[in-house]
Image (cartoon, rainbow, N blue to C red):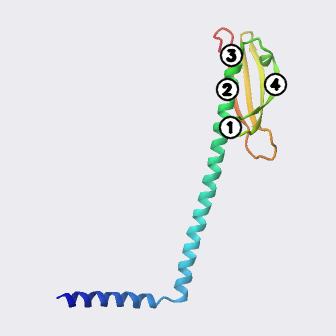
């Protein structure tokens, strides 16, 4: 009984090996082409995911910097020089990475008690191809925010 099981396994193994021995150069070439095609697609997906992550990190960092600047402008009061009508700008450095940005804002007086502040943040280094991030704040004298 044990010999029969052993013989059946040997026959199955031999039939499997005979199938593999019949692989031609054409079949191997097609298999290698499929593997290359799949690896190329995987490499493209990895590259695009890294690019998307880099942009997301930049937008998160820009949102943090703009948010901090808006809080400083709100805390400074309505009559500070930073909130006078016109264009203003200042360089900003991110403390963790040391990356430098240029923060610009325009103050528009809509009415006596309402100002519109349009902020934009862009990389200080022109060689970086990152987009400008913008935010708008309406500052009311009556509401004090």
Q: Position of residue 60 (x, y in %)?
A: 63, 37
Q: Position of residue 100 (x, y in %)?
A: 77, 37
Q: Position of residue 107 (x, y in %)?
A: 77, 21
Q: Position of residue 113 (x, y in %)?
A: 71, 10
**Helix or strand or loop: what does disc 3 sit on?**
helix
Say whether marks 4 and 3 touch (CB < 8 Å). Answer: no
**Helix or strand or loop: what does disc 1 sit on?**
loop
Q: Nearer the viewer, mark 4 or mark 1?
A: 1
**Relative horizontal placement of residue 84, taking residue 22 as reference (left or right):** right
The quadrant the N terminus occupies is bottom left
Q: Residues within 10 Å of mark 4 (few under 14, many from 20)?
A: some
Q: Nearer the viewer, mark 2 or mark 1?
A: 1
First reached walking from the N terminus: tag 2 or tag 4: 2
Say whether marks 4 and 1 touch (CB < 8 Å). Answer: no
First reached walking from the N terminus: tag 1 or tag 3: 3
Q: Nearer the viewer, mark 4 or mark 3?
A: 3
The quadrant the C terminus occupies is top right
First reached walking from the N terminus: tag 2 or tag 1: 2
Q: Name the residue located 31 percent from the left edge and 89 percent from the top edge.
A: 10
**Helix or strand or loop: what does disc 2 sit on?**
helix
Residue holding disc 1: 96
Front in this rendered view, residue 100 or 79? 100
Q: Name the residue located 70 percent from the left edge and 40 percent from the top edge.
A: 97
First reached walking from the N terminus: tag 2 or tag 3: 2
Q: Nearer the viewer, mark 1 or mark 3?
A: 1
Label 2 – label 4 distance at C-alpha: 16 Å
Label 2 – label 3 distance at C-alpha: 11 Å
Q: Residues within 10 Å of mark 2 (few under 14, many from 20)?
A: few
- Extreme residue toward the left, this view: 1
């Amino acid at each position: 009984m044990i010999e029969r099981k052993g013989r059946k396994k040997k026959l199955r193994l031999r039939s499997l090996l005979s199938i593999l021995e019949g692989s031609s150069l054409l079949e191997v070439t097609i298999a290698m082409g499929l593997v290359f095609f799949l690896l190329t697609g995987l490499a493209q997906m990895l590259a695009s995911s890294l690019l998307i992550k880099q942009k997301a990190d930049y937008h998160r960092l820009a949102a943090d910097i703009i948010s901090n600047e808006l809080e400083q402008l709100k805390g400074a009061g309505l009559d500070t020089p930073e909130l006078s009508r016109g264009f203003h700008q200042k360089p900003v450095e991110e403390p963790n990475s040391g990356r430098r940005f240029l923060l610009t804002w325009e103050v528009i007086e809509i009415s006596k008690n309402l100002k519109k502040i349009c902020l934009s943040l862009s990389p200080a280094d022109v060689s970086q191809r990152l987009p400008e991030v913008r935010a708008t704040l309406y500052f009311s004298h009556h509401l004090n925010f």
